[in-house]
Image (cartoon, rainbow, N blue to C red):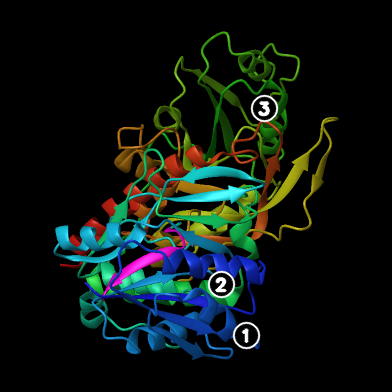
Amino acid sequence: MKTNIVLHHSKSAGYSQEGWVKTLQSVLVQTGKDFEITILHDSDSDISAEIEALNTSAVAITVLKLQDEPQSVQLQKAFENSNADGHLYIDNRTQQVVLKKSALELLGLTVKNNKNVGMIYGDYELLENNEVKEIRLLKHHIGRVRDNQDYGKVFFFTAEALKNSEPVSADVQFNAIYDLRLKISEKFELLHIANRYAGSLYQVVAQSKAHNVFDYLLASKDSQLEAENILSGHLKRIGAYLEAGAHYTERPKAGSEATLKASVIIPVNNRPEFICDAIESVQAQTVKEVEVIVVVNGGENDPTVESVKAYQPGGEKYDASKPEVRLLIHDMNNLGLCFNSGARIARGEYYVQLDSDDRLTPDAVEKVLAVYNSDPKIGMVIGSYEVWEKDASGAITRMEQIPVVTHDEWTEENGRNNLLRINGAGAPRSIPIELIKEIGFSMNEEPFARNYGEDYQMVMKISERHRIGRVWDPIYKVIRHAGGTDHSIDQNTIDRNDEAKDFMRKERIQRRIKLNK
């Protein structure tokens, strides 16, 4: 099998010319010998001397001189320039990538053994501060539709898949590989080569940064809109796209036990130092027909229990003129259990979210109710929030570098489709209590579920049959602190969370295909 190996010589490279030479060297010494090389050259430097010095085996090397062309156009020209059976693309534009000597031979055998393969990607090593880390990627399935999913820096595309899939879109400026992999996945398999020990296909030399759940907020608007359009096209081609307004029905009527406007359900485990502020933010609501249901899931000995009892009759913070604080105690930390059991005893028409370490603004419930009152087909209301930080003294300050999180990528026309591309939908979320009783929160029965993503899954389910209403003003304060679940997160946790949500996406995409039929 003849292979066209494509790599960059880029003016945007974040490493030295010596590093680029190492990339080219790693290509030229491959044990698989039937290949040619295409270099996408968009810098002003002359690389002919380096090529001549390294190319002792007279490998056919083509240098395509390109200036200010997006990645999509560069790839299209590289593929069209060769009649090879496959293309091994190395995305070394900003990071040095070094192939293992046997990479091409392994890829060729993989293609031979898998007749419907369209793209192959594999685990890799990350060299950071002279330390090698093994990066293990997730295996592709129909639910892996996020644009920020890591598929690595090296990709093998079969010529057959490129020929028989939707073509690379030349107007794609930011998300060429995302566009290409989704298109290939519609007719061909995307195969992942896994590494257990010393089996990575290549090494990336880079300075990685700590994971931050708010990174997506800093992505350019143009890039976000482009990725949305790419996903929408993919969903349409596989029959999973939901047209604007399709399948909407009216939300269920409130039950006879709904004597209040809203029930704020707060699941909590061992956070006595936060729960008081959360409770008091509910009691300060402009709408007084509310209740607080605190569900402590650490058992009777959880210190949060005594903090909550202080707001009940006989407690030092009890005030009969304020909204009632009710208490449920479970001896197992299962968020689905907390939400479902809280909804079962709720006296409010609507559930309103509040995490134990966060706070509602005083007008939160008022603004949520106004949205519900605007349309009987609205089955969920999602607000906007600010991010605050709590220091060691207990003081909180607004994190000005993070803008108000509105999730304005949610549009009336396309929000529920675009939801599949991103990991969040906004906060706080509100759901009619009757709808919770009907659908029910997940209780970790799905693969990979570990008290993560159950609210995201509810958004996906409800949006198939009801409108999602939005409050664009900030009505919620997310408090970041050292003990928060988003403050410090390792790669294994990131992967486990991604597995959970991607499995949920898989289920919903398959459901939508059936729904459209």
Type of secondary structure dominating the magenta stretch: strand
Q: Are marks 3 and 1 in contact (CB under 8 Å)?
A: no
Residue where numbered disc 2 is placed = 93
Task: Confirm whether residue 169 shows in the render.
Answer: no
Residue where numbered disc 1 is placed = 43
SS at circle 1: loop
Q: Is residue 463 left or right of residue 342?
A: left
Residue type, numbered disc 2: Arg
Q: Which mark is residue 262?
A: none
Q: Are marks 3 and 2 in contact (CB under 8 Å)?
A: no
Residue where numbered disc 3 is placed = 275
Dot 2, crowdedness within 10 Å: few (<14), some or many (≥20)? many
Q: Nearer the viewer, residue 138 or 129?
A: 129
C-alpha span from label 3 to label 1: 57 Å
Task: Point out the frontmost of discs 3 and 2.
Answer: 2
Instruction: Report x, y in % for residue 254.
Output: 39, 44
N-terminal label among 3 and 2 = 2
Task: Point out the frontmost of discs 1 and 2.
Answer: 1
